[in-house]
Image: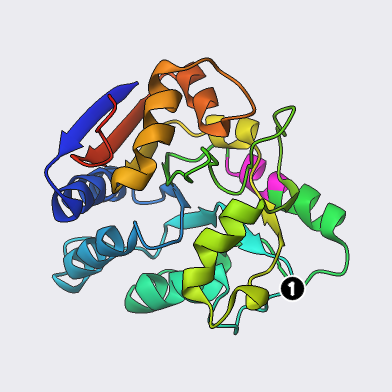
Amino acid sequence: MEIVIKKDYDEVSELAAKYMLDVIRNKENAVLGLPTGGTPIRMYNIVVEEYKRKKILFNNIKTFNLDEYIGLSKLNKQSYYYFMNKHLFSYTDIKEENIHTPNGMTKDVLNECINYENKIKAVGSMDILFLGIGQNGHIGFNEPADFFEPYTHKVILKEKTVKSNSRFFEKIEDVPVTAITMGVKTILSAKKIVMLAIGETKADAISKMVNGKITPQLPASILQLHNDVTVIVDENASKYL
């Protein structure tokens, strides 16, 4: 596990974008695993800027998002599909059929999880997967638990996660409490993993992920088992390293 400490959010984003751009340039049909949330927005902005300069193409790129809220349609402004379209997809030539997000409006969540997992397996493996980390150490929506969920599954979000995500909603009662997320084995199947973490609120989780025991009570700790992980943090998030 490589730890890279950058001065601030902009520097973290620039390096993360470089990893994504290098993969796209080197493999025209690359498969990307993508996150949502506040942290990757600047990374996506930089990638879009490169696309507008005609330095990269997305027409053969495939993407798989880490997760999606259950109960939100693609048209809902808080859905992760909407987020990705707003910050990345709508500015590129990516084909709609190459964009993959779990269907939050499915009537059969179990079947949707199985289908999503099979779609990922069908492409072989993700060439690069980007992650954030929750204050409680969650990756994707894999919350602290008694065991690791290996494959794409339904999850009930912890109160701390709901509270954190409420900043994107008008009120906390609007935040969905269930989601579909890639499991840890699915995450570990990616060839390369890049994690971004910003701010002192993430410092404890980062320290435990890097130096602590591997435990499902801190899901991110499982990344210690992957042979190609780069963790990019700002100075505040590196406080306890």
Measured from the top left, where is residue 234 in percent x and y? Answer: 21, 42
Q: 28 left or right of 52?
A: right
Where in the figure is residue 12, as x and y percent of width and height?
20, 47
The amino acid type, in three-letter code, at marker 1 is Gly
For the question of whether residue 189 can be seen, the reply is no
Query: Whole-percent x and y of residue 117?
Result: 70, 45
Find disc 1 in the rendering and name its residue.
Answer: 71
Q: Measuring 48% from the left and 56% from the top, which residue is drawn there?
A: 62
Given residues 205 and 151, the one toward you in this image is 205
Work out whether residue 225 can be spotted: yes
Q: Is residue 239 magenta?
A: no
The answer to whether residue 189 is left or right of residue 236 is right
Within 10 Å of disc 1 (Cα), the crowding (few <14, some 14-19, many 20+) is some
Q: Image quarter for residue 237?
A: top left
Please provide the residue range marked out in magenta.
Answer: 117-123
In this rendering, the answer to whether 71 lies above or below 183 is below
Magenta residues, dominant SS class: helix
* Residue 68 appears left or right of 178: left
Question: What x and y, as percent, mark residue 227?
Answer: 42, 18
Under circle 1, the secondary element is: loop
Q: Is residue 195 above or below residue 76?
A: above
Q: Residue at x 58, y 73 (%)?
A: 79
In-image side of 10 versus 204 (left or right): left
Seen in the picture, residue 151 relative to 37 is either above or below; the reply is above
For image coordinates 52% across by 15% down, the residue present is 213
